[in-house]
Amino acid sequence: MAHLEVPLHQEVLQHLGLYGVGNIHHNLEVSTLIEHAIRQGEGALAHNGALVVRTGKFTGRSPKDKYIVQDPSSQDHIWWGSVNQPLSEEAFERLQRRMTDYLRGREVYVQDLYGGADSRYRLPVQVITEFAWHSLFAKQLLVRPDLFPDGSLLALTASLLPQGAGFTILAAPGCQAVPDDDGTNSSTFIAIHFGRRLVLIGGTEYAGEIKKSVFTVLNYLLPQFGMLPMHCSANIGRQHGDTALFFGLSGTGKTTLSADPHRDLIGDDEHGWSHDGVFNFEGGCYAKCIRLCEEAEPEIWSAIRFGTVLENVVMDPETRKLDFDSDTLTENTRAAYPIPYIPGARIPGMGGHPRNVVFLTADAFGVLPPISRLTPAQARFHFLSGYTAKIAGTERNLGKEPQATFSACFGQPFLPMHPTVYAHLLGEKLTEHNATVWLVNTGWSGGPYGVGQRMNIVYTRAMLQAALDGDLDHVEYHTDPVFGLQMPTAVPGVPSEVLNPRQTWADRAAYDAQAQHLARLFVENFEKYKSEAAPEVLAAAPQG
């Protein structure tokens, strides 16, 4: 299908100050965008047809360069601090002028897309980029009107934004801030203005900033209507139609574990839990592909083909063969592809209310059990805690070793409002729909990082399948004395000694010391929620 020759609306041009730009390429098709990217030296085709690009010096997000504008419409709702750094109206205006001046005379690429697969709640998003491959990235990862044609402008947007408009994202990596003039920490900036419905991204080629900006916007809008935005993947059982959610930060297995050959994929990263069920925010997947192999992850492997964007994957310039094992550029290598590339993907990405909710953590200390069942109070405690280990490369300035961290709601960098807002919504929905919550450790067993081994993915899949199929509903459980977690004593296809982490350590005394250490970290982290947490949630803390 030929690309749409539709001019940008004059009010949008006026809103952005984008006068005098060069050619405006509006809603180009995938093949045309790839041609533009190759012609302009932005990327090259691999042997399997995927477009291979590099993101420059930034191969991950830049959380210290993200800002929210202090405007009257939103400032009383924002959780201000290191996550949401304030930016003045004046500074935002300077950045916008700097960016529009930069783009004058240059070609720009425009995509009209949506955030949200449910036509009742989706948000119109217009993405304007300097690079053709960024436009392709946005087209493949957000919701495309041609793939999700049903529905109209969402009612909540019309209510919250009286002009009936969505958000615009303006991404120009070549435009850099001047910190002394613009009030930024560096030349990189991701600035969100809720009042103007505008996001500015400059000084970074990492395309993940585009999709996470949409996620941040939805994290602000949806809770105001009683809906829970979630940093999670989701799938649905083919036989019983049971929806499952998988929470977790980058590298914990959200994408890998939700791409299950026995279940249909709703989405791999961002969802909303509405009054009617679960819906995907996106129309694509953004999978980590470091050490990707066909045997372990066949669905992701087969999705890497023409139309897929590969970020920072090493490629032989002559043979065009890909080296997924190489971390020469970064550990955070990524594949961005539309969700129809996954066999059995649900289109549109919607499901019923979840029957099972899984919290994924990559425990670098190697002491949490590979699977455990949580009480309702423990579920709220661990959701607010959001413990995991950041894997090298997902953010700037991380070293080679994983770093233990606590990220509220398993998505703290994307929460415009206080974490308790989201935790309260989760607690209400878990109770209302009687969902079972599981804590699954995809991290280390038999010792900490550097001593033990990463959890066997075959065992993890077997444990999850047993949990989702109801096979663990009536087995015997053992309660961990430190964390209070209920650990099943038997799971089909999994050695029993794997289920109790203490038994996997050669030095049991070392395990006990490490468990007490991690328990203390949990308790110390939760101090900031002590005044607002219910007594039963406080009682669910580990005994460190």
Image (cartoon, rainbow, N blue to C red):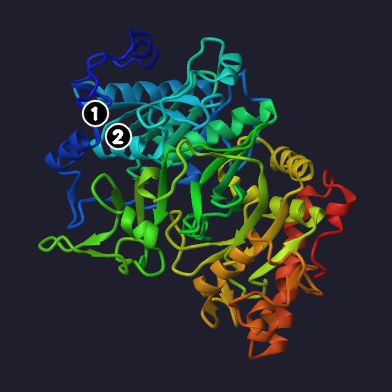
Give whichever of discs 2 and 1 has the lower sequence position. 1
Q: CA distance from mark 2 to mark 1?
A: 9 Å
Vertical relation: 260 (above or below) 71 = below
Which one is in front in this view, the residue at disc 2 or the one at disc 1? Answer: 1
265 vs 161, nearest the viewer: 265
Indicate the quadrant containing the C terminus: top left, top right, bottom left or bottom right. bottom right
Residue drawn at point x = 67 percent, y = 26 percent: 224
Numbered tag placed on residue 28 in the rendering: 1
Residue at the front extreme?
Answer: 239
Residue type indicated by callout 1: Leu
Left or right of 388 on screen, residue 318:
left
Question: Residue 405's spot in the image, x, y percent?
Answer: 61, 60
- Which residue is disc 2 drawn over? 135
Q: Position of residue 78 (x, y in %)?
A: 65, 31
Could you classify mark 2 by the number of other residues whose Cα lies within 10 Å: few (under 14), some (14-19), or many (20 or more)?
A: many
Give me the residue at 54% from left, 83% from top: 451
Say whether residue 542 is visible. Answer: yes
In the rendered image, residue 157, in percent from the top left (x then y), is placed at: 56, 19
Q: Nearer the viewer, residue 78 or 260?
A: 260
Where disc 1 sits, the SS reads loop
Q: How many marks?
A: 2
Task: Tell whether 254 sits left or right of 515.
Answer: left
- Disc 2 marks a residue whose amino acid type is Ser
Residue 444 in the image: above or below residue 376: below
Relative depth, front residue between 330 and 277: 277
